[in-house]
Structure formats: structure tokens, C-alpha cells
Image: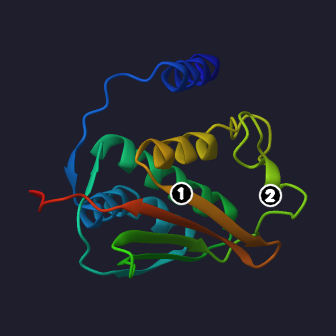
Amino acid sequence: GRISKIIQTLLNMARPGKSQHVLVSLESVIETTLAFLTEKFSRRGIEIQSEIDSAPNVLGDPERLQQLFLNLFMNAVDAMPDGGRLRISLKTSADDEIEISVADDGQGIPERDLPRIFEPFFTSKEAGTGNGLGLMVAKGIVKDHGGSMKVESEQGHGTEFQIVLPCGDAPAAS
């Protein structure tokens, strides 16, 4: 089953299906994704701190954007096995771009691993617990939406992913 899942992920990246691009409220996507993981956060002792400003919509695929946040939130959960705090912010920049930050106060990423975290199959997780595709997929989703993604991390002090996406042109229906 695990091999099938990995192969399917690779096939989807190699020849992605028709992506529907509609106006999407990132506020709604983030809130829905957080709600989906509420029980997992609670069981792990993870406190959610969010600063979600009202922001323009993006032109994108809502399912793929939800997958982006799901991957980032799950990585944060894995980085905080003994609990901690997940901080999410969403705001509009002076350049009318949408800036999203997903930060945790978990284990952090060793400096030697930072250049490789977006490579396929690179993982620091134990065998059987990660396939090393989540961050590669996340970065691909951001790129497909015309955005950029960078990471800052300090081992023992947490990690922050910073995403910038272009704004859409009109209001979206929630």
C-alpha cells in the first residue's frame, strides 16, 4: 500500500491532471485544514496560534492548496512529538501579494539537511513513517500557483515556511 501511494504521488507530479483554477479564499482553506486536524493537534498537545487577516483571493486549485497546508501542518506535528505551538499567519504585502507563514517550535531541521528538504525521497523521519515527498509536493503546488516558498530553521528551535502567492482578481465565494 505504501509503495502504491508513493508511485501515485510521483505519477501525479509527473503528469498532473487538469487543475481547476478558480478564485479561492486562503482563509477558508487554512481554517478547513486546521479543523480537519483539530483532534490530532489536541492529542499531541499542540497549541494553534493564528493571525489570519482578511486577504484577497488567489487564483488556484482549492484541493491542491489544501494539500499544501496539510503537508506543512503535518510536518509541524511530526516535528513536535512532545507538543508545542504551531503559528500560522496570513496577510497581504505592500506589493499586493499574499504572504503565509507556517512556523513551529519543534526540533528544527539540521543545517546540513536544509538544502535537500525539497528533494524527492529525502526524509529525516524513521523508515516507514515518511516517504520524503511531502515538501517536494508542497513546493510544486506553490510553484504551480505562481508563488515562491522558502524555509528558515534552527535545530532545536523550530522551523518556519514562508510562502508568497499572487492575488487573484475578484472576490471568491466561500
The residue that appears at 54% across and 21% down in the rendered structure is 14
Compared to residue 155, the image places residue 58 above or below, namely above
| Nearer-the-camera pick, 167 or 55 | 167
The residue that appears at 53% across and 27% down in the rendered structure is 13
| Nearer-the-camera pick, 18 or 11 | 18
The residue that appears at 68% across and 35% down in the rendered structure is 131
Question: Crowding at label 2, few (<14), some or many (≥20) Cα neighbours within 10 Å?
Answer: some
Q: Residue furthest right?
A: 112
Q: Is residue 97 visible?
A: yes
Residue type, numbered disc 1: Ser
Q: Quadrant of the C terminus?
A: bottom left
Quadrant of residue 152 in the image? bottom right
Q: Quadrant of the N terminus?
A: top right
Quadrant of residue 134 in the image? top right
Residue type, numbered disc 2: Leu
Query: Could you tell me how far apart the alpha carbons at marks 2 and 1 are, in whole angstroms?
Result: 16 Å
**Mark 2 secondary-structure assignment:** helix
Q: Give x and y (percent) for residue 119.
A: 73, 40
Q: Which residue is mark 1?
A: 148
Q: Residue furthest front?
A: 95
Q: Is residue 81 visible?
A: no
**Mark 1 secondary-structure assignment:** strand
Q: Which residue is mark 2?
A: 114
| Nearer-the-camera pick, 111 or 170 | 170
Compared to residue 89, the image places residue 71 above or below, namely above
Q: Give x and y (percent) for residue 171.
A: 11, 62
Q: Is residue 90 left or right of residue 122?
A: left
Question: Crowding at label 1, few (<14), some or many (≥20) Cα neighbours within 10 Å?
Answer: some
Q: Are marks 2 and 1 in contact (CB under 8 Å)?
A: no
The residue that appears at 30% across and 62% down in the rendered structure is 167
Q: Give x and y (percent) for residue 113.
A: 85, 54
Which one is in front in this view, the residue at disc 2 or the one at disc 1? 1
